[in-house]
Image (tube, helix red, strand yellow):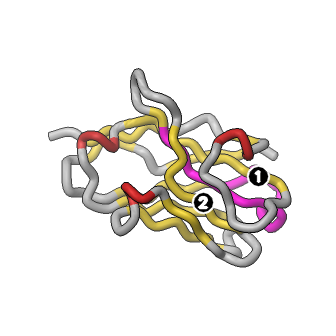
Amino acid sequence: LQLAESGGGLVQPGESLRLSCAPATVTLEPYAIGWFRQAPGKEREGLSCINYKDGTTNYLDSVKGRFTISRDTAKNTVYLQMNSLKPEDTAVYYCAAELLPLGRCSLFQREYDYWGQGTQVTVSS
């Protein structure tokens, strides 16, 4: 499974971005898709995830209310809508896939089998 993120860029504080995660060819139905980020000098952290088949979601507490994960089954794509962005949201954002997740999707990177290359998000005035 090859994943590709898109939608990153440079925005000002308070603005929004929507990241997309799509596979090259394979359907995402058997997977959970997670969004992670890694800021310079920091560990990678899990932000949100979605069980693609049933749409159940999970969020890191610190992004609840600002970030929303969703899927478009017609487009075989998962999105991360990020609102009210802050300079501390600056990081490389990755999507990842966990095959056949058991129960609620996880925010732990060790659970994920496939990773995209990442997309840079910079929040700066």
Instruction: Identify which residue is drawn at 56% across, 65% down.
Output: 58
Q: What amino acid type should be assigned to the residue bearing mark 2?
A: Cys
Looking at the image, the residue that sits furthest to the left is 125
Q: Residue at x 62, y 35 (%)?
A: 117
Please, is residue 12 above or below residue 84 in the view?
Answer: above
How many circles with numbers are drawn on the protein?
A: 2
Expressed as whole percent of the image width and height from the top left, the position of residue 90 reads 34, 38
Q: Is residue 9 above or below residue 42?
A: below
- Is residue 42 part of the magenta span, yes or no? no
Per the rendered image, the range of residues in magenta is: 22-37
Q: Where in the figure is residue 118, as x and y percent of width and height?
A: 56, 37
Q: Secondary structure at mark 2?
A: strand
Q: Would residue 102 appear left or right of 85 to someone viewing this image?
A: right
Q: Position of residue 51 (x, y in %)?
A: 70, 67
Q: Residue at x 47, y 34 (%)?
A: 38
SS for dot 1: strand
Q: Along the horizontal axis of the image, is 110 left or right of 20?
A: right
Q: Amino acid at mark 1?
A: Glu
User: Going 31% across and 62% down the picture, which residue do you hit?
Assistant: 83
Looking at marks 1 and 2 on the same chain, the residue that comes earlier in the sequence is marked by 2
Badge 2 is on which residue?
49
Which label belongs to residue 98? 1
Label pair 1/2, CB-CB below 8 angstroms: yes
